[in-house]
Amino acid sequence: MPSSKDAIHHDPATQEAIQKLVSGIATGRRADLLIDMMKTVVRYGLDDASIGDLKLVSRSMSEMRYAASVFQEYNKVRKVAVFGSARTKSDEADFQLAREFSRRIVEEDYMIITGGGDGIMGAAQQGAGAEKSFGLNIRLPFEQSANQVILGDPKLINFNYFFARKLSFVKETSAFVLFPGGFGTLDEGFEVLTLLQTGKTSIVPIILMDRPNGFYWETWRRFMDNDILELGLISRSDFHLFTITHDIDRAVNEIKHFYKVFHSYRWVRDEMVIRINKKLTPAALENLNQQFDHLLISGHIVLRDALPEEADERDLIHLPRLVLIPHKREFGMLRLLINAINDSQVIETPHDEAIRAPGIPSTRD
C-alpha cells in the first residue's frame, strides 16, 4: 500500500486543489509552507488517524494560530516573561518585588507576558498594567483563573494544552524572569534552560529572582552545583545561561545590556549569523576572535552584511552581521560571546539612534 506521502504525490487533483486554495492568500516562501501544512492535513485523513489524534492536532493548531494572531500586532516590541507561584499572597515580599520589577521593565519599552493567573503573575500584571501585558492562561480544574488585571483583555489567551502555551512563551519572549514557585515554575524554568542548552531556541537572558535575603534560588543552585554538575549531568558552562539576583536594578540592567549591541541571531546551515545594532571597531572584532577562537570549528568571526538567505527578513536587512562557524555545544559559552559583543567598542555614526528592536524575529528563528 502506498504511503500517504506517495498518494498525494501521485494525485494531481489533490495537489492542484491545495495550490488553488493557497494561491489566493500567499506567495513565495509563505505559500510553500502553507502548502506543506495542508498536505499534512490531507495525510492525516489518508492515514485514517483516530478521532483523538485529529482533535489534538486540530485544537493545538487552532490555539497556536490564535495566539500568533494576537501577538502579531506587537511583534516589534520586546517582551519579558515572568514566572512564579500562583499562591504567593499580595503582602509577601516576592509579590511586591514582581510588581515593582514589571513596573520598571515596561518603563524601558518592554511588555510583560505571564501565565495570566494570580500570585506572582497577578503581581507582574499589576506592575505592568493591562495595556503592557499578555496573559497566557491554561485551563485547569483548580487554581488558574485569570487575574483581574488581564481578565477580559484581548491579550488574554486561553490554552487547553501546556505544550502550545509553552511554545508561545518561548517564541515571543526576549527574556525570562522567574520568581519562587512550585512544580509549574520549575517546569517552565527547566524547559527554557533545556532549549537554550541544546540550541533549540535562541539564547536570551534568564534571571532567577528572589526577595532580599531569600534563599530559594541559592538552594536550587546548590542542588545544580553539588549534585547535577558533580554527577557530570550538566556542564560548568551551563551556569552562564542564567543569573541569580535579589536586586531589581540588576535584573533590569541585565536585560537592557543584553540588547545593547546584540540584536538577535539565526543559523544559516552551519553559520551563526549574529545581527548587531552597530558595527564593531576593527580592534573590537580582533579581540573577539582572540578571546573566542576556541569556539570556532574553522575560520574567524567576520563582519559582513546580510546573507542572501536572509532576504525574506526585510525589517532586519539593514543590520550589520557577525558571522562565525561555532561548535554547536556548550551554548553557555555562546552566551559569553554575546556578553563580550555588548561590551565591545562600536563605531558611532552621526545618524545613530536607539534601536527599539525593529522586526524582532522569533526566538525559535
Image: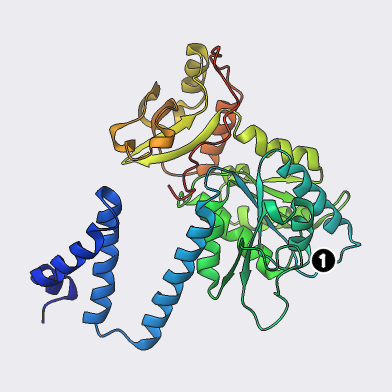
Element on which disc 1 rests: loop
Is residue 184 toward the left or the right of residue 305 in the image? right
Question: Percent x, y for residue 132?
Answer: 68, 51
Q: Quadrant of residue 144?
A: bottom right
**Mark 1: amino acid:** Thr
| Residue farthest along the front direction in this orientation | 24
For disc 1, the neighbor class at 10 Å (few under 14, some 14 to 19, many from 20) is: some
Taking the spot 49% from the left edge, 48% from the top edge, the residue there is 363
Please indicate, yes or no, whether residue 141 appears anywhere in the rendered image: yes
148, above or below 3, in the image: above
Is residue 8 or residue 226 the one in the foreground? Answer: 8
Is residue 75 or residue 299 the one in the foreground? Answer: 75
Question: Percent x, y for residue 27?
Answer: 26, 50
Please indicate, yes or no, whether residue 177 appears anywhere in the rendered image: no
Is residue 345 or residue 199 the one in the foreground? Answer: 345
Q: Quadrant of residue 96?
A: bottom right
| Residue farthest along the right direction in this orientation | 91
Is residue 52 or residue 211 the one in the foreground? Answer: 52
Disc 1: which residue:
88
49, above or below 332, in the image: below
Is residue 98 toward the left or the right of residue 80 in the image? right
148, above or below 217, in the image: below
